Amino acid sequence: MSNTISSVLRLKCPKCRQGDLFCNKKTYQYKGFFDMPKKCPKCGQDFQIETGFYYGAMYVSYAITIALIVAVFTALVVFNLFSIELFLLLDFIVLLVALPYVFKVSRSIWIALMIKYDPKAIEKYERKT
């Protein structure tokens, strides 16, 4: 289970857990930010599963965003610093900074929910080619 979480957070292929899901590995470099290879370079897993496949990642992104908002709210309440102005300002900053990573990790989570891990995926792919 921890390997699954690790590969999702490191934005790796869910099938082999080694290939990169995104062409641009840097989270905050915006050139080519959305680009994903068509297939995993290590195991050949198709990343373009079907048209509109990644629309489901919006639900994951929404859940992560709500979790971040609740975390900011909880931190302000726990430290007795809550004011609506501070809450909105901190939420804006946190969400703005987290947005690029949330986008990528949401896609990573979504595809990991659909594709099963295969420890021999790379071997099988190398035999085919």
Image: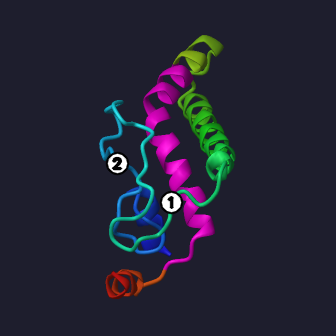
Q: Which mark is residue 85?
A: none
Tag 2: amino acid: Cys
For the stretch drawn in magenta, the main secondary structure is: helix
Q: Earlier in the sequence, mark 1 or mark 2?
A: 2
Q: Which mark is residue 47?
A: 1
Q: Which residues are magenta?
A: 90-117
Residue drawn at the location 51% of the way across and 41% of the way down = 103
Q: Position of residue 51 (x, y in %)?
A: 65, 51
Q: Nearer the viewer, residue 64 or 20?
A: 20
Q: Nearer the viewer, residue 96 or 125?
A: 125
Up-down: is 66 above or below 39?
above
Instruction: Report the quarter where the C terminus lies.
Output: bottom left
Q: Position of residue 66 (x, y in %)?
A: 65, 38
Q: Quadrant of residue 11?
A: bottom left
Q: Quadrant of residue 123?
A: bottom left
Tag 1: amino acid: Phe
Q: Position of residue 104 (x, y in %)?
A: 47, 46
Q: Nearer the viewer, residue 108 or 96?
A: 108
- Does residue 79 appear to the left or right of 43 in the view shown? right
- Label 1 sits on a secondary structure element that is loop
Q: Is residue 93 magenta?
A: yes
Up-down: is 2 above or below 118?
above
Up-down: is 107 above or below 93?
below
- Does residue 97 appear to the left or right of 50 in the view shown? left
Q: Which mark is residue 23?
A: 2
Q: How is the image coloured?
A: rainbow
Q: Position of residue 10 (x, y in %)?
A: 38, 57
Spatial separation of the CA atoms under disc 1 and disc 2:
12 Å
Number of residues whose C-alpha sits closer than 10 Å to that of mark 1, classed few (under 14), some (14–19) or many (20 or more): some
- Does residue 113 appear to the left or right of 97 in the view shown? right
Q: Is residue 88 magenta?
A: no
